Image (cartoon, helix red, strand yellow):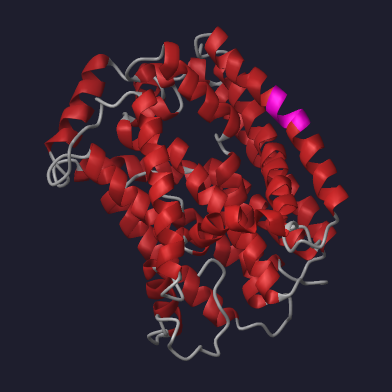
Amino acid sequence: MNAAPKAERHTSIDTLRGFAVLGILIMNIQGFAMVMQAYSNPLAHMDFSGANQDVWFFSHVFFAMKAMTIFSTLFGAGIILMLGDEKQARIGVHYRRMIWLLVIGLIHAWIFWWGDILVPYAVMGMLVVFARRMSATGLMIFGLALIAIAGALMTLGMMFIPMMEEEQLQAMLLPTPEMVSETVALYQQGFLARLGENMATTAEAEVMQVTFFAPRLAGAMLVGMALFKMGFLTLRWSVTQYAISAILALGIGIPLTWWSSMHHIETGFALDQIWIGESANYFLSPIVAFGYASVVMLMCKFGLFRMLLHPFTAAGRMAFTNYLTQTLIMTYIFVGSPGLGLIGTVERVDQLKIVIAVWIAQLIISPLWLSVFRFGPLEWVWRSLTYWKFQPMRKTAPVSAEPSPPGG
């Protein structure tokens, strides 16, 4: 499999994971700061002009579905990293790990935030593990095929949006002012008061994940397995290969994604046109994500960037903690008592300022924490639950003989 040495493998993968876990926040914050429909239709809630429109445009071009795609591919690569592709791999450890991820994800989704990704990750992780012994070529073909099938289903579904009943449209994209006001008031009222609404939204979101998102997610995981076996994620490619990949992928992906975002704005998110921009971004996002990953791998090849990348590497090693911490921070800011209840009051420009502040905090705290401890706090909990044994936390403690779970 031409695997890289363990230290190198962890560094490159964790660095890329660090960029991804920070990048997803710029999209996720919209699901906390505004009503759910505004995530797909920014005209549904608050101002969408001037600098606010610019922030949406920037986020959509450079981050929408890109960071999530990277995160998903790394999850698949992590399965290979942990189990390898041997027939007698300790599959029981993997399943215990996925079951606990599912439990944590269900709590995260149903209690805290409807936009959870841990539940579908756990479910798909239980399935794609059986493909780990396939060749890199087979994994890549099968993975890209799943992504394409999911994209075709999504496109077909969005083309029928104009034919939906009014109530369906209101629930998905076009909430009435009264619906927006009621949702905002409910979330501002407090954490417990909005619990039922969050659960109802979570139920809808998880149905969408199973029908439209799951095949893409599984496909991305398979692609991640392929990229690991190909040596892409373990720095086995040459500087020239990474540079060419970055130039081609970003040179194609960014301009076309730019066009798709402009199409949304120019058509005013018209119901009969929205599928064009969304489908374009869907199919282009893996290309852009591959370009981003190529840039990060290229930087990892040079010791010159080691100090610059170190905080991102640490953030990636603590990705589980950082992801869930982002939810806690956003919940405190935007949900009412015991939080601040600022949902519906923070425009996109100020949302970006919050994102940058969280980025800075996590890039500072992650390396400081890991200078003392072996794992992030939630990585330690997850790992201890997986092995039914408290794991050594401080760096002075004896090292366990158990293999390290990917990302933890």
Q: Is residue 164 above or below residue 149?
A: above
Q: Position of residue 60 (x, y in %)?
A: 54, 28
Tally of numbered tags: 0
User: Which quadrant holds residue 218?
Assistant: bottom right
Residue plotted at (38% across, 67% down) = 378
Residue 112 visible in rendering? yes
Q: Quadrant of the N terminus?
A: bottom right
Residue 80 visible in rendering? no
Q: Nearer the viewer, residue 182 or 32?
A: 32
Left or right: 231 in relation to 388 = right
Q: Is residue 354 above or below residue 390?
A: above
Q: Position of residue 158 (x, y in %)?
A: 56, 25
Q: Nearer the viewer, residue 384 or 357?
A: 357
Residue plotted at (62% across, 46% down) = 216
Left or right: 385 in relation to 285 = left
The stretch drawn in magenta includes residue 205: no
Numbered range of the magenta stretch: 251-255
Q: Is residue 226 above or below residue 85?
A: above
Left or right: 289 in relation to 270 = right
User: Which quadrant holds residue 258?
Assistant: top right
